Image (cartoon, rainbow, N blue to C red):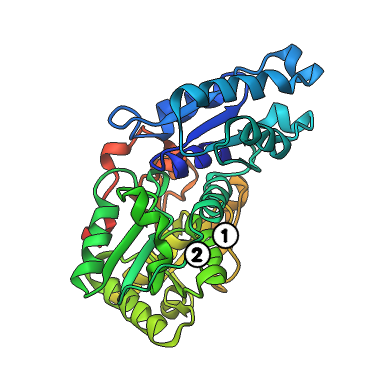
Amino acid sequence: ADVSGVCSALFELGGMTVMHDASGCNSTYNTHDEPRWYDMDSLVYISGLSELEAVMGDDEKLISDVSDAARQLHPRFIALAGTPIPMITGCDLPAIAREVEGRTNIPSFAVPSNGIGTYVAGAGQALRLYAERFITSRPEKRKNAVNILGATPLDFSVNGCVQSMARRLEEAGFTLQSVFAMSSSIDAIDKAGAAEANLVISSVGLPAAKYLQAQFGTPYVIGAPFGDFFSPYVFDALRESIRTGAPADVIGTFAQDAPDTAIVGESVTAKSLAAALAVGYGIGARVICPVEAPDGVLGACDLQLEDEEAIEAALRGAKRVIADPLYRPIVPKTSEFYALPHEAFSGRIYRKQIPNLAERV
């Protein structure tokens, strides 16, 4: 859900994230959605909202608890994330965040999550809000420097995929400014304005990319550099963007008519995989995206479907289906099924089976 996306996006950025909820959202996030939980410290908390507080609207308890914790822990920022109950009752989280910031002098903001949207919306909004508060200075541009935007374990797990993409980028002659927001120093991320281009590797990174374009004029390329076949096209698009200062489309270049393969997944990563299959093996694939998809990412043959029955109908006639293993029951028996576990969909169940697509396609 979007609240897990908020926590995942902000996990490594030195802040304190507070889910305003009774209890369940925290356990779901830290036991199923966050593989870094056991190896890396992060301040992720839940407010412990009671029924009486929800009904009576006792905002002072939340404000006091968050302020007291912040005075003891000294986070860089405080992020408040909404869940279903407080959003139904009309809790004004932005006002609460302003009150908390006034009491603590710590930058605070509310992410407009509600526990009903998907991680794409939550993580994307969180990264953009962080960028608006902390990526504001205009440092001197670094030649061929690139930010990787949209990196969270929900799309890429912790199997080395993000590090492989960063390595491929540097081997192609670019300088890595930052990975926003995995495996990079906070200082490098806060100086993201020094990059000459941004690489958006999942739709989670697009809101931040648009902010950086508006703030610093930094162009962006949408596409994850998967494997030996597709990566050179991504890097050529980055070079073109640096040269022209304009965004470049790369994942739409390889769309094929009458594709016989279906890929179920997040729009940018699935389209990047489809492009890798097209250029490397001549396999045409359509993407079925079950979460939010930014405008212009999906092609004419692709579908954005949230309903399981609609996805099942769309898979009929597919020669091959590539999807998380939990989709197998609705895949036609006549189709070849290729399991591609997705942390945001099945959590930790198949985590050890998630491949590093930056190396293997």
- Work out whether residue 117 or residue 61 is closer to the camera in this orientation and state it: 61
Q: Residue at coordinates 51% horizontally, 55% vertically from top-left? A: 131
On the image, the x and y values in percent for residue 110 come to 63, 40
Residue assigned mark 2:
209
Residue assigned mark 1:
293
- Work out whether residue 84 or residue 100 is closer to the camera in this orientation and state it: 100
| Camera-nearest label, 2 or 1 | 2
Q: Residue at coordinates 79% horizontally, 28% vertically from top-left? A: 89
- Work out whether residue 89 or residue 60 is closer to the camera in this orientation and state it: 60
User: Quick one: label 2 or label 1, which is nearer the N terminus?
Assistant: 2
Q: Which element carries disc 1, helix, strand or loop?
A: loop
Q: Residue at coordinates 52% horizontally, 22% vertically from top-left? A: 69
Q: Is residue 316 visible?
A: no
Please identify the residue farthest to the left as the structure is shown.
Answer: 171
Q: Is residue 243 visible?
A: yes
For the residues marked 2 and 1, what is the alpha-carbon distance in whole angstroms? Answer: 15 Å
Other residues around mark 1 within 10 Å, as few (<14) / some (14–19) / many (≥20): some
The residue type indicated by label 2 comes to Ala
On the image, the x and y values in percent for residue 282 come to 32, 76
